[in-house]
């Protein structure tokens, strides 16, 4: 009798039915998480297709010349003979991006070296939270401070309106500084200790070690840090729009007002009719932004394939 | 110049760089808090904004910001968890996994204005909703999803292997192990990551300009029927968030007290983001202590 209840209990515990439901749950769970992973692919493809078709509409159905769009410096979509030359915005975007990287790169990499090489004990404790707080400040706040402090300051010191490429460059360089610093810090601290020690062992000073050994060894990742910063600067819209002055002509000096791809989209998207030519060319500008962010990703992939440490 | 002098000069320069970075942050925060703090009072925080006259508040904007943030997290957290679980537990090296990784990378690096324009096409025009809270929240979901997936994946990957293997060795299925062993263990890091991501969403403006819009209808805060057009809870109404408000009053505002409103709003925005930061750290450590044996 005992034997019988034992087997009963065992068979009850090992009911095939319950196993099946566990198996079903396992499958359902797997498909559920797979679905959310696939949603990411769907979103990316949808963004590419939607913005691609919408961005090409101006050239295909409105007859805007792609050649004019990419080579002419005259932009006036509301004139009687509308002109669609996007060069001022494309050049403006590249100009602020490169200029801000020129400031943020030495500062960011310098900060990273300070944290990892100069004062590793307390430097990191101070700079790390500072960098994290800088990341957290929303871009409109950077723009607002630029507008209310930086622009009047530049107007008084260097002359002109204050709204300028220079103002955009300064605001953007502060905004991308945390990106550059945090990745550069990872790059420096992931270098093997042996590099440092062997350099010191043969009598090199700290600066010689940093400049001749550590920076070259970390170069691919340091470049990745700069490119990521540039990608952020290229796509930043509101902060730049608030300080750059938004004119349609090419700037002749760094103190001249200018415009970028993002600023012209921000300004005009709201008050052009959806589907009109003036509106469609804005989508073409957005397509350039999209293509540029793909190029930045390819560049980062290439750089990370050259990582040594 | 001998190498010792060069070394000393270089060290000084590095100190200067570090000092510059700290000064920039202290200057920024100090400026915002110093100028904005005096404007903060209950009246400013609760009264509706005015489009022409001085003395408007940011009550509606503040509500909109939190409401959109809440909806965004309602969409993002389950999707991010799903994606994170897949990437950490089920993804096998191969083409599909590579494709998902590439897409996460692409989505994370897209400029937010581009996501806003996608939102305009998809959630404003295609759906016919017009500018709406739901459209804004969905655009922000696209913006926030790659971050959440990474947070969840990293959190799950840091759970000790032994715990997972012990559970599997007991004959518990993989899915049940994820639900009952891995997720609870990873919960503190996921929560911290989600709150940090909330700070980012809270301050985002470019993705909302063309999805949630620049206006807020007159809201009746005694009407809590979500289907009524004057109800604050209605998800199909346009809604200007706090970050968008700062941009709008500065670039297209007609009110005479732009500076006061912008100062106050920036202070609120910065304080909220700081609170999100502190909260994330604090809750993370408290929950961690509570549900694990570690001190």
Image (cartoon, coloured by chain):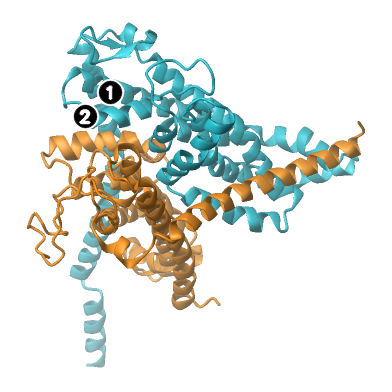
Chain colours: A cyan, B orange
Q: Chain of mark 1?
A: A
- Residue receiving disc 2: A271
Q: On the picture, is B136 further left or further right than A255?
A: left
Q: On the picture, is A17 further left or further right than A167?
A: left
In front here: A242 or A132? A242
Q: Chain of mark 2?
A: A
- Please tell me how many numbered marks the rendered image carries: 2
- Which image quarter is the N terminus of chain A in? bottom left
Residue depicted at x 69% and y 43% = B17
Q: Are marks 1 and 2 in contact (CB under 8 Å)?
A: no
Q: Is residue A192 visible?
A: no
Report the Cα–Cα distance between label 1 and label 2.
Answer: 12 Å
Establish if A302 lies above or below B257.
Answer: above
Q: Residues within 10 Å of mark 1 (few under 14, many from 20)?
A: many
Secondary element type, mark 1 = helix
- Residue receiving disc 1: A282
Q: Residue furthest left?
A: B228
Badge 1 and badge 2 in a common chain: yes
Residue depicted at x 13% and y 56% = B234
Earlier in the chain: of badge 1 and badge 2, it is 2
Q: Nearer the viewer, mark 1 or mark 2?
A: 2
Establish if B172 lies above or below A82.
Answer: below
Q: On the picture, is A193 further left or further right than A146?
A: right
Q: Position of residue B112 (x, y in %)?
A: 35, 38
Q: Position of residue A23 (x, y in %)?
A: 25, 61
Establish if A250 lies above or below B247.
Answer: above
Q: Position of residue A136 (x, y in %)?
A: 47, 51
- Which image quarter is the C terminus of chain A in? top right
Q: Position of residue B128 (x, y in %)?
A: 10, 39
In front here: A196 or B119? B119
Question: Of the numbered discs in the image, which one, if any, rests on residue A99?
Answer: none
Secondary element type, mark 2 = loop
């Amino acid at each position: 009798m005992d034997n019988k209840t034992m087997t009963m209990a065992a068979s009850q515990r090992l009911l095939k039915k319950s196993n099946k439901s566990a198996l079903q749950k396992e499958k359902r769970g797997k498909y559920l998480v797979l679905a959310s992973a696939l949603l990411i692919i769907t979103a990316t493809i949808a963004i590419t297709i939607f913005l691609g078709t919408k961005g090409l509409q101006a050239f295909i159905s409105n007859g805007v010349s792609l050649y004019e769009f990419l080579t002419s410096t005259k932009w006036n979509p509301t004139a009687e003979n509308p002109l669609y030359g996007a060069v001022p915005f494309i050049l403006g975007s590249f100009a602020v991006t490169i200029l801000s990287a020129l400031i943020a790169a030495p500062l960011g990499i310098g900060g990273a070296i300070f944290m990892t090489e100069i004062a590793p004990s307390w430097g990191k404790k101070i700079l790390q939270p500072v960098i994290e707080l800088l990341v957290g400040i929303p871009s409109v706040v950077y723009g607002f401070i630029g507008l209310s402090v930086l622009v009047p300051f530049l107007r008084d010191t260097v002359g002109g309106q204050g709204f300028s490429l220079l103002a955009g460059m300064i605001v953007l360089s502060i905004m991308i500084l945390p990106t550059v610093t945090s990745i550069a810090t990872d790059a420096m601290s992931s270098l093997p200790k042996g590099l440092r020690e062997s350099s010191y062992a043969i009598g090199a000073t700290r600066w010689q070690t940093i400049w001749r050994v550590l920076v070259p060894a970390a170069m691919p990742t340091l470049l990745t840090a700069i490119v990521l910063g540039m990608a952020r600067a290229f796509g930043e819209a509101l902060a730049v729009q608030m300080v750059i002055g938004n004119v349609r002509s090419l700037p002749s000096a760094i103190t001249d007002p200018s415009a970028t791809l993002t600023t012209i989209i921000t300004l005009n998207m709201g008050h052009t009719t959806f589907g009109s030519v003036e509106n469609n060319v804005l989508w073409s500008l957005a397509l350039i932004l999209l293509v540029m962010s793909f190029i930045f990703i390819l560049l980062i992939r290439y750089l990370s394939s050259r990582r040594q440490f | 110049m001998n190498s010792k002098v060069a070394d000393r000069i270089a060290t000084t320069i590095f100190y200067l760089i570090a000092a510059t970075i700290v000064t920039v942050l202290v200057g920024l925060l100090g400026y915002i808090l110093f100028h904005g703090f005096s404007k903060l009072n209950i009246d400013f925080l609760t009264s509706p904004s005015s489009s022409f006259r001085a003395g408007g508040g940011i009550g509606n904007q503040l509500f909109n910001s939190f409401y959109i943030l809440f909806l965004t997290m309602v969409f993002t957290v389950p999707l991010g968890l799903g994606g994170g679980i897949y990437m950490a537990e089920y993804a096998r090296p191969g083409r599909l996994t590579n494709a998902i990784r590439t897409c996460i990378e692409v989505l994370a690096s897209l400029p937010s204005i581009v996501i806003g324009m996608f939102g305009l096409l998809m959630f404003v025009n295609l759906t016919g909703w017009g500018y709406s809270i739901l459209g804004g929240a969905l655009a922000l979901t696209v913006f926030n999803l790659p971050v959440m997936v990474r947070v969840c994946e990293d959190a799950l990957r840091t759970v000790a292997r032994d715990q997972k293997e012990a559970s599997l060795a007991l004959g518990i299925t993989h899915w049940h192990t994820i639900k009952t062993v891995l997720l609870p263990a990873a919960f503190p890091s996921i929560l911290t990551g989600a709150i940090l991501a909330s700070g980012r969403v809270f301050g985002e403006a470019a993705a909302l300009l063309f999805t949630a819009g620049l206006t807020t209808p007159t809201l009746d805060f005694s009407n809590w029927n979500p289907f009524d057009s004057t109800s604050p809870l209605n998800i199909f109404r346009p809604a200007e968030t706090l970050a968008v408000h700062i941009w709008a009053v500065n670039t297209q505002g007609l009110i005479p007290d732009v500076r006061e409103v912008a100062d106050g709003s920036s202070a609120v925005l910065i304080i909220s983001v700081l609170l999100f930061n502190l909260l994330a750290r604090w809750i993370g450590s408290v929950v961690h202590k509570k549900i694990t044996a570690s001190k």
